[in-house]
Amino acid sequence: DVPGNGEQKHDGFQESGERMELTERELIDQIAALIPEPGDRTLLGIGDDAAILQAGARSSVVTTDTFTEWVHFRMDHLSPDQVGFKSMSAAISDCAAMGATPRWVTISVAAPDNTSSQRILSMYHGIVEAARAYDCDIVGGDTVRSMSDLTITITVIGEPLGERIWTRSGARIGDDVLVTGELGGPMAALALLENDPRLSLDERYQRTMIRFLRPEARIDVARALANFPLTSAIDVSDGLSTELHHIARASGVGFHIERETIPLYDGALVVAEDLGYPAEAFALFGGEEFELLLTVEPGYDEDMIHTVEQETGLRLTRIGTVVDAEEGVTLFDSAGGSEVLEEKGYEHFG
Amino acid sequence: DVPGNGEQKHDGFQESGERMELTERELIDQIAALIPEPGDRTLLGIGDDAAILQAGARSSVVTTDTFTEWVHFRMDHLSPDQVGFKSMSAAISDCAAMGATPRWVTISVAAPDNTSSQRILSMYHGIVEAARAYDCDIVGGDTVRSMSDLTITITVIGEPLGERIWTRSGARIGDDVLVTGELGGPMAALALLENDPRLSLDERYQRTMIRFLRPEARIDVARALANFPLTSAIDVSDGLSTELHHIARASGVGFHIERETIPLYDGALVVAEDLGYPAEAFALFGGEEFELLLTVEPGYDEDMIHTVEQETGLRLTRIGTVVDAEEGVTLFDSAGGSEVLEEKGYEHFG
């Protein structure tokens, strides 16, 4: 959600010859440096899953995401309605990560000149299905045809579900680290597609494929957790390793993660075994899913966890502890081994 | 601001061979038919310059616009910072047309792979300059590189300046029709560029070129008019003829326009004479400018008009009367002639 948060490396092409071309990281940083500090009516500007706006006594959140063919998804992996639904889930997931529910969305579609009307309509069918599923109104947008890869920009305005809006920056040393649901399904599905697209049609993998093709934002979990003593939250759309590092940077902390406790999706285990891949990597470096990574004050009521699990049908799993920033982000195993967890992951879907 | 509001005709390419390809108009209508009716928290959905949202006791407006190279602007006409500034003005103008001021914006940029970082940064310079000029916070966005024409999507959230938010649908028979400022400058500039780009450098045309290169949204006028008894409002971004027809359709009325009273920008008169074009057409079928077209209850206080003119430095000109829908939109001249005003205009800029 940061301007300059482009996922694709660019080729260093130099137009003017007068200046050195910037790396993508440098470009992002320079754009961020240009953006003025927001005024009093903006409680939180660029840099989290969403911004926090103050209008009178009420606050709301707003987030914009752009999804581009080849960068974020492939039309040979997803049907047009799946592209629509998945883009909505990805955008709305940023609301869930702030402890907010989506209220209004705007949709802009730039479609290549040669896209058939039926494909565009089918994409809107997926968008509308998601708007119904997440109970939000589509209140504006544009559809433009151009010499472009298919590009969908979705802006979501949401309202907080509880008293507080969650950010990435509140984790404190000693907090517990929780994750919702099970991880690794979407990346296992992508591994199937990349290995041999025909595998994706195998009955054995259908549940796993659905986690990739039609992922759901965790608004239900955010609602159930609305008044839980969370100190920070983020969705794992870029994979557990990347998201842990995001919270670590924003909160100025480190993480001890107990690697055997990371909840792996059972279908991902099957794919991992069949393809000979390490299942844990699907969770750590995968993403493309919208489970929530949370930190919570220690000493919380375990019964509340069970209530949330019952309400949502999802597990909440403790996977580690917040530690001092100097300790970095580290995976520990029960045999006493440890490994620094690098920040890496897929940043596109589909 | 309507999904499906694509400005470019598409080529009727048929992918499946199974169904007839839709016209652009049919596609827009079918997309609109897919979008569910909004809930109670949305006071006005798709179809006006912006949607009106209700959050508690407060209302706000939101509008999304997508600007695409070749469809909406040409990089050989505008410098990157002008593209940034002009896109912001165009998006924010939709707030002015609702009687609102912009508070928060999100920006998404999809840039071709070979765009230099300096050009992207220069575009952001224009965007930031506009955010400062219009006093709003940039609170989110994305920058993605892809195989695309340059595409900028801007979402603006605004707050009402007065008690009421203006729409297109409130014009009533007998209302006066007013327009702010002077029309035709940007189209005169575009005519110069299309006639011979070198002309655009002529000192004689500099003021006119600036109206095209760096147009301003009329937030100042909207503020000055905030408590004026307006019955409808729209910006003339697609030209006077198109906008009159928009209000006519939304309000179920017609218009008598006194053609000699339409305020033409003096620089447009010069260009018209030099190129042998009819100056009036620049105003009627031009657009690319952000003056406001307003209807107002008759018997308003003329002194208020003068106050607004003094506060803003812009003329407010009465150009006609709202009439019965059956009378259509008609131009009258002082010699007693009349002519039906067709809905046509440029729908792109630059």
Image (cartoon, coloured by chain):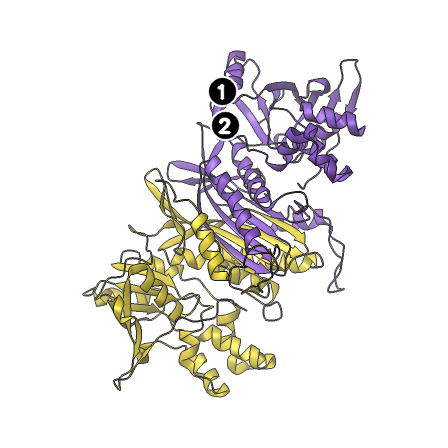
Chain colours: A purple, B yellow
B268 relative to A148 in the view: left or right: left
Name the disc covering residue A64, or none.
Answer: none
User: Could you say whether the residue bearing mark 2 is in a helix, strand or loop?
Assistant: helix
User: Could you say whether the residue bearing mark 1 is in a helix, strand or loop?
Assistant: helix
A141 relative to A279 in the view: left or right: left
In the depicted structure, whether residue A328 falls above or below residue B73: above
Percent x, y for residue B212? 50, 71
Identify which residue, A251 or B114, lies in the foreground.
Answer: B114
Percent x, y for residue B162? 31, 52
Residue A344 can be seen in this image:
no
Identify residue type, mark 1.
Answer: Glu
Percent x, y for residue A137? 43, 42
Percent x, y for residue A312? 52, 22
Identify which residue, B14 or B261, lies in the foreground.
Answer: B14
- What is the distance, in whole Å, between disc 2 and disc 1 at their CAs? 8 Å
Whether residues under marks 2 and 1 lie with C-beta atoms below 8 angstroms apart, the answer is: yes
Quadrant containing the C terminus of chain B is: bottom right
Identify which residue, A328 or A189, lies in the foreground.
Answer: A189
Identify which residue, B29 or A323, lies in the foreground.
Answer: B29
**Which image quadrant for residue A317?**
top right
At horizontal 61% and vertical 44% (from top left) the residue drawn is A79
Binning the other alpha carbons within 10 Å of mark 1 as few (below 14), some (14 to 19) or many (20 upward) gives few
At horizontal 54% and vertical 64% (from top left) the residue drawn is B8
Give the letter of the chain under mark 2: A
Mark closest to the chain's N terminus, 2 or 1: 2
The lab-note entry on whether marks 2 and 1 share a chain reads yes
Identify residue type, mark 2.
Answer: Asp
Identify residue for label 1: A311
**Which image quadrant for residue A314?**
top right
Give the letter of the chain under mark 1: A
Identify residue for label 2: A220
